[in-house]
Image: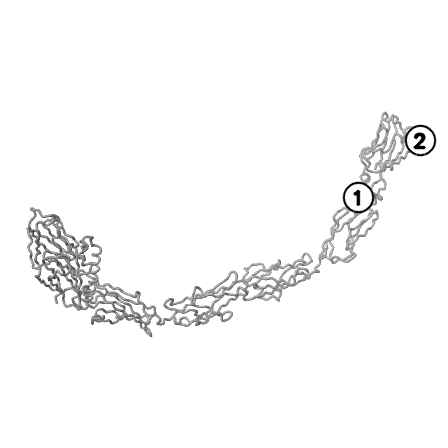
Amino acid sequence: MEQLRKRYVSVFLLFSASWGIALSMTRYSIPEEMKEGSVVANLAADLGLDVGELATREVKLDIIHSKKYLEVNKNTGELYIVEKIDREYLCPVKTATTCFIKLDVVIENPLRIFNIELEITDINDNAPRFRRDRIELDVSESAPRGERFSLTNAVDPDVGSNTIKSYSLSENEHFSIETQTGSDGTKYVDLVLKKALDREERAVHNLILTAVDGGVPARSGTASIIVRVLDTNDNAPQFDRQVYSLNITENSPIGTLVLKLNATDLDEGTNAEIMYSFTLYTSEKTQEMFTLNPNTGEIKVKDVIDFEEVKILEMHIQAKDKGHHALSGQCTVMLYVTDVNDNHPEISIKSLRSTVSEDVPKGTVIALVGIRDRDSGDNGKFDLSISEQLPFVLNKSSESDFELVVSESLDREKVPEYDIVLTVTDRGTPPLSDNETITLELMDVNDNAPQFPKSFYTIPVMENNAPGSLLSSVTALDPDLHENQYLVYFIIEKEIVNTSMSMLFSINPENGDLYALKTFDYEREREFLFHIEARDSGVPPRSSNVTVHIIILDQNDNTPVIVSPWRAHGSVVEEMIPRSTDKGRLIAKVIAIDADSVRNSRVTYQFLQITDATLFSLDQYNGEIRTMRMFSYRDPRHQRLVVVAKDNGDPALSATVTIKISTVEHVVKAFSDTMEVPLEYDIFSDLNLYLVIGLGSVSFLLLMTIFVTIVLKCQKPKPTKATPPCRNSVISQRSSTVADSTLVSNDAYWYSLFLAETRKGKLVIRQPIPKGGGYIVSSIPRSTGLTETSDSAASTLQYSK
């Protein structure tokens, strides 16, 4: 660069011919923008000055301009640059073709003045620059081709070939430029429309205008041209679809957004502002169900949408712009209503038999049931069922009709009435259901016989009952109704010893209360067995019977009778015993009998009075009186014992006997072996023979059971046939033989029991079962199989006819 600048330096030397005050003009030419320190010329050489004298002669450099761009080196005489020189700054007027710096070189001693002109030549150090780097133009899309638009020109401070040479425009199909040169040489540019604009195709055109100078190398500057295409209402609004098809669920909440229409208008401004509206082709019903926002195009639910009323909704919508000459576009919105399960299935009873006979045959139709569901698809399909396990089934007769049919035998007595709950459930999600209750009443038929709670009644009756007393209530049940349930009770006739049951008992035909018609005596009658029949009033009537067992219970109404030791009425029994009697000797045996039952006839014995309690003992169960010690000389000769025999009844009854015991040195026989002393008092009264036979049999079995028990439990090893004293035993320890029973007549059994051994012999009693008979005490011979012999005869009770 430095060499380039030096190449431009031209030294023009002008020498004057006069030597006093010399005046000379020297010219130099340098390019602008030389670096500081660059040598312009050697003034000393050019001016013919001695370099050595420059310092002493005071060389001064006077520059006319305010800035001091140059300086003289006093040592070398060289003119050099002290500050860069900008030609455009020095010579801002572009019309000047040359640019000079004038300076004077003054040398003292002698005074000399040299005029120097320094030409500053231009270099291409400035690029073209537009006054505005952004040029905005508004062009209507309706502008015709060839229309021109003035642009701002570029400026370049350089001159000559370094100034602006040409303009260029970025490539495009709509615009071009034309350049014109002014009188001052300035170049101006016009933008020319060569193709019609379409704002909807391209609303803005961005162009680049470039200015290029003629320097080497060339410099350029650019400006951005923004062409905004002004709209004209030449486009109608357009929907993105001509037909919108979508589904909408019925019962959608009010305010639900259905669709947001998006109509577009390629225009802008008011020409692109769109208003939406329903056209006349949209039904009023549809317009009542939906709202259309005229500004946003939002379609929302306005009213209830019911699939069952309408399944397809059609809307015709217009989009219209706000241009001076408004244009519009249209579309169709098709809404297909989707069914939801919002309708419960409904049950209707078309026919019903509310009452049927319980013997109705299987397959009988009870009701006709219809089902209706307004929904569709799975929401309209349903399943019908019967609650619980009932004897009915549903038969499908058509798509929505069913028959309720009897499937099993009916029994009014088990279930008198059915509440048949019909439940229908659709197959929607969630499922909806409905139910209906059918009440079916069963009418009774006489298909049940009366039933007694028990198959056998055992009725205890206390003897001595009052005639007409209520014994029990024998009641049957009949599960039927009305006359089929009304029962009448009968005693089935049966005779016992020429006596009819109806003479002994009576039953209330309405309620089954059983009464006794007479007073019963346990000692005569023990039980009765007969049948009672219950019969309903149905047609035909049904009946059943039950066995009734009347058991007569014993009452403690018989006082014990002391039969041993025997005594006359009101007399005292006298016994004589040797004074030398040993300890444990059997003195007497008290035996009492009781005609009551075993429980009431159980007799115990005890002393009521005794002279000396240390001398005698009494077994409370068998009545044996024995000595507890031997007699002493201090003991009185006469001892008086009063024994009471008490039964086990409640209250207990008792009898007493007084025994007077006299001690003697020797015992004298009182009776002959063959002598018989009969004592008689009435035992029997006139009883029916059949009672005697029955009671005798029972007593015989009872006594035999007691006898066997006594033999098995009370038998001692020695002697082999001896029986020890035990409770309720009437067998003597010394004589335990039991005689056989003897049938005296067809009316009663007689039992011969060995009771005791006395000095007079062995006492035997034959006891009849019937109460109130007479007893005869007599002697029986020794040949009855007794184990011991005695001089006295045995006493026997015999039946007196």
User: Viewer-proximal residue, 725 or 649?
Assistant: 725
User: Viewer-proximal residue, 178 or 762?
Assistant: 762
Query: For the residue marked with disc 2, what is the amino acid?
Result: Ala
- Label 2 environment density (alpha carbons within 10 Å; few <14, some 14–19, many ≥20): few
| Quadrant of res 510 | bottom left
- Label 1 environment density (alpha carbons within 10 Å; few <14, some 14–19, many ≥20): many
Left or right, 615 with reference to 698: left
Quarter holding the C terminus is bottom left
Q: Which mark is residue 611?
A: none
Left or right, 370 with reference to 461: right
Residue lying at the far bottom in this picture: please name it. 540
- The image shows residue 196, relative to residue 45, as above or below, that is below
Tell me how far mark 1 sits from mark 2, CA to CA. Answer: 48 Å
- The image shows residue 209, relative to residue 490, as above or below, that is above
Query: x, y (%) of residue 405?
Result: 44, 70
Q: Earlier in the sequence, mark 1 or mark 2?
A: 2
Query: x, y (%) of residue 255?
Result: 56, 59
Badge 2 is on which residue?
A: 17
Q: Nearer the viewer, mark 1 or mark 2?
A: 1
Quarter holding the N terminus is top right
Identify the secondary structure beneath mark 1: loop
